[in-house]
Image (cartoon, grey):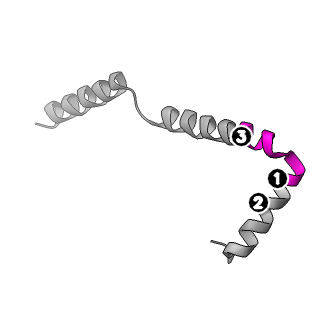
Amino acid sequence: MLGLGATELVIILLIVIVLFGASRMGQLGKGLGEGIRNFKDAIRPTPEEDDDEKDVKQEDQRKAS
C-alpha cells in the first residue's frame, strides 16, 4: 500500500483529525460511503437492462442459426 506502514497511517489520520475536527470526520466518512454506493449502483445493470441484453443475445443466436 504505497509503502505506508501503520505508524505513517496513524500520523496521517491525526493530521486529518486536526485539520477537519472530529465531528467533521463522520460527515466525510458518510459522504464517501454514499459516493461509493452511488457509483456501485450506477455501474450495476438494472434487471430491465439484463432482460434487454438477454433478448439481444437470443436474437443474435437465432440469426446465426
Find the magenta span and give its range. 17-28
The residue indicated by pointer 1 is: 17
Give me the C-alpha separation between circle 2 and circle 3.
Answer: 13 Å
Q: Is residue 27 magenta?
A: yes
Q: Amino acid at mark 2?
A: Leu
Q: Position of residue 30 (x, y in %)?
A: 66, 37
Query: Residue placed at 82% from the left, 52% from the top?
Result: 17
The residue indicated by pointer 3 is: 26
Q: Position of residue 40 (x, y in %)?
A: 50, 38
The residue indicated by pointer 2 is: 13
Q: Is residue 18 magenta?
A: yes
Q: Please state if 5 lies on the left or on the right of 43 as rendered.
A: right
Quadrant location of residue 32? top right
Say few, some or many: other residues with alpha carbon within 10 Å of mark 1 (under 14 / 14 to 19 / 20 or more). Answer: some
Query: Residue placed at 81% from the left, 60% from the top?
Result: 14
Q: Amino acid at mark 1?
A: Ile
Q: Amino acid at mark 3?
A: Gly
Give me the C-alpha separation between circle 1 and circle 3.
Answer: 11 Å
Query: Toward the viewer: 22 or 43?
Result: 22
In the rendered structure, which disc, 1 or 3, sits on the residue that comes first in sequence? 1
Say few, some or many: other residues with alpha carbon within 10 Å of mark 3 (under 14 / 14 to 19 / 20 or more). Answer: few
Q: Secondary structure at mark 2?
A: helix
Query: Residue placed at 75% from the left, 44% from the top?
Result: 25
Q: Is residue 35 above or below residue 19?
A: above
What quarter of the picture does the N terminus occupy? Answer: bottom right
